Amino acid sequence: MLPERAISPHPNLVTENGLRLMDTQIRELEAAREGARAGSDSALLARIDRDLRYWWQRRATAKVVAPPEKRDRIRFGLRATLRLDDGTEFAFRLVGEDEADPGAGSISYASPIATALMSQAVGDEVELMGRRAKITAID
């Protein structure tokens, strides 16, 4: 028997896109489940059913948070651009845990980096991973 997927203790905040991603994941898993049933693949079916339980739970508890109209501080749903002390710039968007994809520029609002940056404004300097970073834009 497969262990259940862990459910985060944090509130399940999502963007509108995050909610769509959940719905897509559920639809894809439901379609895959039909294929696993037709092929009598009990191991695959067990994994799919476990993943569906996870996504159904996450979908049921999802709270859509629209990006704030006032964009003077880093908040959920907004993109922030930072410049490190060596001049390197990077941007990220604060999103829900299940939609976070650091490689694509989105990080979980519950991550340590997001926690350090939450409520900071353009011009503020923060320490991230032992380096100084200045917030240069919020959009």
Image (cartoon, grey):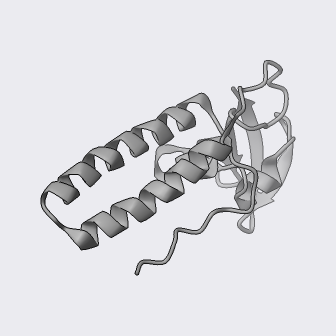
Total tally of numbered discs in the picture: 0
Whole-percent x, y for residue 2 in the image:
42, 77
Q: Residue at x 43, y 64 (%)?
A: 50
The relative height of residue 16 versus residue 37 in the rendered view (above or below) is above
As drawn, the residue found furthest toward the left would be 39
Whole-percent x, y for residue 79 in the image:
66, 34
**Residue 88 visible in the picture:** no
Image quadrant containing the N terminus: bottom left
**Residue 135 visible in the picture:** yes
The relative height of residue 27 versus residue 112 in the rendered view (above or below) is above
* Residue closer to the observer: 3 or 124: 3
In the drawing, does residue 61 fall left or right of residue 41? right
* Residue closer to the observer: 17 or 76: 17
Q: Residue at x 47, y 45 (%)?
A: 104
Q: Residue at x 69, y 26 (%)?
A: 139
* Residue closer to the observer: 120 or 49: 49
In the drawing, does residue 131 fall left or right of residue 37? right
Residue 81 sits in which quadrant?
top right
Q: Residue at x 76, y 40 (%)?
A: 135
Whole-percent x, y for residue 7 in the image:
63, 63
As drawn, the residue found furthest toward the top would be 69
Whole-percent x, y for residue 12 in the image:
69, 48
